[in-house]
Image (tube, rainbow, N blue to C red):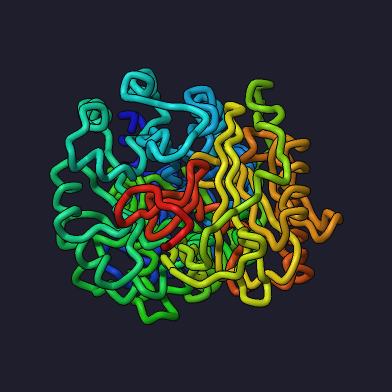
Amino acid sequence: MEQTVRERLIAIAAKKEKAAVVYQNISVIDVMTRETYTADVAIDSGYIAAVGEGYEGIENRPGEGFFIAPSFVDAHVHIESSMVPPSEYEQAILPLGVTTIIADPHEIANVKGAEGLSFMLDDAEGLALDVRMMLPSCVPATSFEHAGASLDAAALAPFVDHPGVHGLGEVMDYPAVERADHDMLKKIKQIEDAGKLVDGHAAGLGPREINIYGVAGIRTDHESVSKEDAIARARRGLYVEVREGSAARNLKEVLDAVTESNASRFLFCTDDKHLDDTLREGTIDYNIRYAIRHGIKRETAYAMASLHATNAYRLDDRGAIVPGRRADFVLLSDADNVVIDEVYIKGECVARAGKTTRTVRRAHVPESLRGALNTKPITPEVFALPLESSRAHVIGVIPKSIVTEHLILDVPLQDGHFVPVPEQDLLKIAVIERHHGTSFSAVGIVKGFKMKRGAIAATVAHDSHNLVIVGASDEEMQLAAERLVQAGGGVIAVNGQEVLAELPLEIAGLMTNRPFQEVGDTLEALNDALDVLEADRSFNPYLTMSFLCLPVIPELKLTDSGLFDVKHFQHISVQAD
């Protein structure tokens, strides 16, 4: 804070000068003391100057019937999962009260490396939305798949001091941490030496492994899926980021761990959330509503959405309605249901009545981030799955979770090959390498989509983002894959030889420069296509499919190198005998 600004704020707080704006007799949601009370709130020079009684402003705004609360922080988000770049993402989430995000661009980094990272940093610069980038720590995520790029400590070093970089993104390669891998520890050290922070990814890890993460310098984790997971992490000093995305929905289970005694260790995040879900239900505002209905004290829920996140990420200039903090706040007409009337950043209104006041700024996308997929010809043979017997390892989908079951089932064979049997909920899944034109591809069996016909496919396939297809026939899977190759990436649903819906993603096969409303409408059309395919609509099949390729989330996944047993961290045959 500049000295002249501080001097003015002191004069306002002392009631020697009038503030620019005073909200009089407004209900203050105090996330420090976790109470709500009525007061005047004085705003000036982008800061909260005073909270109390008898303050006068150059402009006095009646506060009766309204609540003021700190605006929200999404503590861990992959912007790419919205399928739009940062400049368009801002348009979608500012009206929802989110003004600061901790973003990990490891999706585009896995496809385009340092060039993709530079694009995200450049596009985020100058936005009202405060985008704090965490450098991707695991590109590729593991050595068990083929990504588009590789970023070691030396490749990340030029970005460490970038003003838009806040730390090191989720460290998901736990084995590298346990064996004290030189490059991994170098990534952590160069971030710590810059005074920045390290995020974690402790999926499926127990107390022993969490201890190792702790001494490695990791501060957070967003992979808790149960009360026990959350408590184990909080007891060992990690901040627990309670996640509710499109595929992974963990609020219900993890909120059971939150008490008034330990709540300061809990904060909210979305991780991966599609725009259609964001536009339909919200982001962090949804988490607050859910928490309140779950029995969490209202003021505690708002603290988890603001103060606890700013504490975790050392953003001490915001996160509460107290003197001296940035005037980043929301005005609400209904605090329990999080009905937001206006959103402010540094005292300036950035959204009103559900719409941003910000001018739309289209991202400048380098030609090198566009273009066709680099795959070998996709022939019917790519989808063949020969088996010597009917006993097979099968990926079991768990609705609203990115964790899967490792099933061993008897599956039907035809001429020594597995053929999808939709009546038994047994479909094929295929992953095709799309970055370097290699011959790497793999086929497996998946249960849980309940899709009766057709195929769905995407070039969004965490974290290497190869081409993934789930389908009821080889012919439909081939059509879906070929269409996405022609489009340069995207998401698609087909039935027979008909394309039901398609969203081209021309930016690295992950994002599009289209307006977010248009993207949301197309995603809804893709959702409607699921009804034609008679797929299970109780969860998001597209995003669930994209996580079936991620070999750092238990239990059984498929990469372009084959079926992967996460528990034993090795590839296995589909054949179970």
Q: Which is more toward the observer, 21 or 207?
A: 207
Quadrant where the N terminus is found in the figure: top left
Is 489 situated left or right of 218 in this image? Answer: right
Horizontal side of residue 36 vs 212, given as left or right:
right
- Quarter occupied by residue 536: bottom right
Residue at image x 52%, y 74%?
Answer: 337
Q: Name the spot of residue 244 as percent of width and height, x first.
A: 46, 63
Vertical side of 200 occupied by 398: above or below: below
| Residue farthest toward the right in the current orientation of the protein | 498
Instruction: Name the residue nearer the viewer: 274 or 72.
Output: 274
Total labels: the figure holds 0
Q: Where 540 falls versus 211 (above or below)?
A: below
Residue depicted at x 16% and y 60%: 207
Q: Residue at the location (73% across, 51% down)?
A: 492
Q: Is residue 322 left or right of residue 146?
A: left
- What's the residue at 55%, 61% (across, down)? 445
Does the rendering let one see residue 513? no
- Is residue 568 visible in the rendered structure shown here? yes
In the rendering, at what x and y percent does residue 451 appear? Answer: 68, 69
Q: Where residue 528 sits in the image (x, y, percent)? A: 76, 66
Q: Is residue 373 above or below residue 536?
A: above
Instruction: Identify the image quadrant of residue 258.
Output: bottom left
Q: Which of 467 and 53 lies nearest the eye of the viewer?
A: 467
Q: Quadrant of residue 156?
A: top left
Residues 360 and 41: in front is 360
Give the x, y percent position of residue 577: 41, 62
In the rendered structure, the answer to whether residue 123 lies left or right of residue 141 reads: right
